[in-house]
Image (cartoon, rainbow, N blue to C red):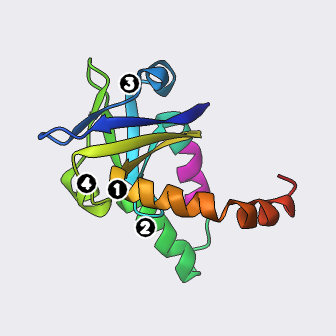
Amino acid sequence: MFIGEFQHVLDEKGRIALPTKFRKDIGHEVVITKGLDNCLWIYPKIEWKALAEKLARLPVSKSQHRSFARLMLAGAMDVFIDGQGRVNIPQYLINFAALAKDVIITGLYNRLEVWDRKSWDSYKKQMEKDSTKVADSLSELGV
């Protein structure tokens, strides 16, 4: 299980070091893709496989299903973790998430998210402000 928030740096070669806490559980190869809210999602291969199988079962007759599958699958890239725990983020994904030098890596149970630090700070501030409304809506789902 991945949890927590960590500050890291995107180097000039487009690499970020994954938090040490996550390295033993994430494996040597991950899949990085376009996430929602203008961040990137990093999945261990086994979690990615489960998600990709679900996406493959979506009815292609529905435009929203096709669009989401395209976002996730066409935007994805297999990435190896080097000996120093770094992943190389493809330029098109750096552009998608508008990543600058300072990034935040968050753990979200079965995946990691990579955010530009300014975007994360703005998102987190709004999320904390709206936390009561969000909690009310989640209570209807038994959370």
Label 3 to label 2: alpha-carbon separation: 25 Å
Q: Which residue lies at the image location 22% right of the left edge and 46% below the top edge? A: 101
- The numbered mark, 4 or 1, whose residue comes first in the sequence reads 4
Q: Is residue 57 visible?
A: no
- Position of residue 61 measured from the top left corner of the image (x, y, whole percent): 58, 81
What residue sits right under mark 1 in the picture?
118
What residue sits right under mark 2 in the picture?
70
What residue sits right under mark 4 in the picture?
94
Query: Do tag 4 and tag 2 residues touch (Cβ < 8 Å)?
Result: no
Q: Which residues are magenta?
A: 49-55
Label 1 to label 2: alpha-carbon separation: 27 Å
Element marked by disc 1: helix
In this rendering, the label closer to the viewer, 4 or 3? 4
- The numbered mark, 1 or 2, whose residue comes first in the sequence reads 2
Q: Could you tell me the amino acid type at mark 4?
A: Ile
What residue sits right under mark 3 in the picture?
28
Q: Is residue 78 visible?
A: yes
Q: Which residue lies at the image location 59% right of the left edge and 81% below the top edge? A: 62
